């Protein structure tokens, strides 16, 4: 199994046992974690032609009144939105396409534009799956802000059952 961050392969992961912690799992996910500000909507399962390149549209919704930095923020100091995915055996994920961000400016400084997502947005995951069932798991890492403050970065779990036929 290997990990893919956005469109870049990170490294191979050797499975060491059921208790292994994956990159998007943290101690705060075991309880007492703050509520999610971004939600993975769908798909939960997709059926694809086995061995052929395909694209899955992954839908997310940001809570009303909030925005998150896009995948390509205009300032290096801002935390970009990333999709971290574990590639199970039998699935290859060469890239993930992120939508372009929309311009946003805080009322205090309307001249400084940020590149953000708000409302609903869709990521396009390109993959090839071998015959059989494969659980693609990961997390969307983001930093949400309102007009006054930014919250600490968070990760929302993502899981899609990929059926290669």
Image (cartoon, grey):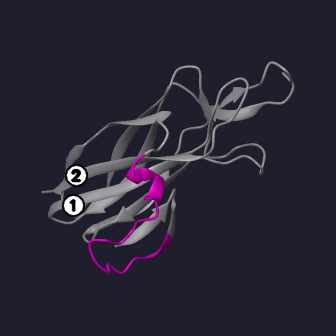
Q: Are marks 1 and 2 in contact (CB under 8 Å)?
A: yes
Query: Where are the magenta residues, as a range?
Result: 10-31
What residue is rendered at 20% in x and 66% in y?
A: 130
Give 132 or 141, whichever is nearer the viewer. Answer: 141
Residue 47, percent across and down?
18, 48
Using the image, tell me which numbered label, if any, was put on residue 73.
none
Q: Is residue 123 magenta?
A: no
Q: Is residue 15 magenta?
A: yes
Considering only vertical position in the picture, is 151 above or below 67?
Answer: below
First reached walking from the N terminus: tag 1 or tag 2:
1
Residue 51, percent across and down?
22, 64
Residue 3, percent across and down?
43, 67
State which quadrant residue 151 falls in. top right
Q: Main secondary structure of the magenta part?
A: loop
What residue is rendered at 25% in x and 60% in y?
A: 52
Q: How many marks?
A: 2
Q: Which residue is mark 1?
A: 134
Left or right relative to 23: residue 117: right
Secondary structure type for disc 2: strand
Q: Which residue is mark 2?
A: 161
In the rendered image, the quadrant that contains the N terminus is bottom left
Secondary structure type for disc 1: strand
């Amino acid at each position: 199994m290997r990990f893919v961050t956005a469109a870049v392969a990170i490294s191979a992961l050797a499975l060491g046992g059921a208790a292994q912690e994956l990159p998007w799992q943290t101690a705060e996910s075991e309880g007492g974690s703050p509520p999610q500000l971004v939600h993975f909507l769908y798909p939960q399962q997709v059926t694809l032609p086995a061995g052929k390149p395909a694209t899955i549209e992954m839908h997310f919704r940001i809570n009303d009144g909030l925005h998150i930095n896009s995948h390509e923020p205009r300032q290096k100091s801002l935390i970009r939105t990333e999709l971290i995915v574990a590639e199970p055996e039998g699935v290859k994920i060469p890239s993930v396409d992120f939508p372009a961000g929309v311009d946003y400016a805080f009322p205090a400084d309307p001249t400084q534009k940020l590149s953000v997502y708000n409302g609903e947005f869709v990521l396009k995951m390109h993959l090839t799956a071998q015959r059989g069932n494969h659980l693609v798991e990961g997390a969307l890492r983001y930093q949400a802000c309102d007009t006054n403050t930014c919250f600490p970065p968070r990760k929302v779990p993502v899981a899609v059952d990929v059926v290669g036929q």
